Image (cartoon, grey):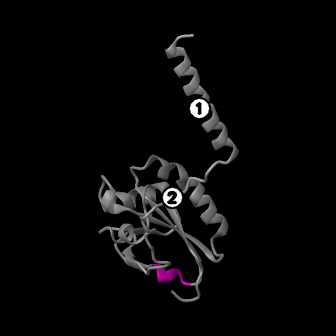
Amino acid sequence: MDDAQETNQEGSGQESEQEAQTTENPEPQVQEDNQEEPEYPDYVDLELVDKDGNPVKLSDYEGKFIALNFFGTWCTYCMQEMPDLEKVYSEYEGDDFVIILLNATTTEKISAEEVGQWYEDGGYTMPMMMDLDGTALGTYPVQGFPTSILLIKKEKY
């Protein structure tokens, strides 16, 4: 046996012992994250507008569970879930639950009026609010579309 073969055998023997030791007594791997989780408000009484430009507030739905659905008409997944959202809304309408469509108007490639037309053409009955200046997007933790946020029922907001 030459020196090179002996070194390879010794080296692989040491690796095997280390591997066996690690397998028998694995040390837990703790990944430290120095970044703090951002804090988001439980509820902010947004004042936005409906499709006709009339002011509307979340507090108008006081005493209900509110599901805010942030969407854009350009978002394929948003459009795919709309019929299901409408079905759930229709089924539970009148209960203590409401789905509010919240259009991220600042991300749209069409005008606010065209978004309103899209809503009417779709025959939707869920309330829709329009975030014309990005206030809602800056208030709630929206990372992508669609995003739904459930606001827990309170007697007073």
Q: Where is residue 92 in the image (x, y as percent from the top left)?
A: 66, 69
Q: Which residue is drawn at 42% across and 65% down?
A: 35
Callout in the foreground (2, 1) = 1
- The amino acid on which the numbered mark 2 sits, given as a three-letter code, is Gly
* Residue 44 falls within the magenta-colored stretch: no
Which of the two residues, 52 or 133, is positioned nearer the viewer here?
A: 133
Q: Is mark 1 on a helix, strand or loop?
A: helix
16 w.r.t. 122: above or below: above
> Which label sits on residue 14?
1
- The amino acid on which the numbered mark 1 sits, given as a three-letter code, is Gln
Q: Is mark 2 on a helix, strand or loop?
A: loop
* Residue 61 falls within the magenta-colored stretch: yes
72 w.r.t. 134: above or below: above
Report how far apart the C-alphas of labels 2 and 1 lie in the structure. 72 Å
| Quadrant position of residue 6 | top right
Q: Which residue is drawn at 60% across and 80% down?
A: 153
Q: Which residue is drawn at 45% across and 74% down?
A: 40
| Quadrant position of residue 103 | bottom left
Q: Where is residue 157 in the image (x, y as percent from the top left)?
A: 51, 86
Which of the two residues, 39 or 29, is positioned nearer the viewer here?
A: 29
Q: Find out whether the residues at labels 2 and 1 contact each other: C-beta distance under 8 Å.
A: no
Task: Determine crowd level at label 1: few under 14, some 14-19, many 20+ residues with C-alpha closer than 10 A.
Answer: few
Task: Determine crowd level at label 2: few under 14, some 14-19, many 20+ residues with C-alpha closer than 10 A.
Answer: few
Q: Which residue is drawn at 47% across and 56% down?
A: 146
Q: Main secondary structure of the magenta part?
A: helix
Which residue is denoted by mark 2 in the rendering? 123
Is 6 situated left or right of 142 in this image?
A: right
- Please provide the residue range marked out in magenta: 58-62
Q: Of callouts 2 and 1, which one flags the residue occurring earlier in the amino acid sequence?
A: 1
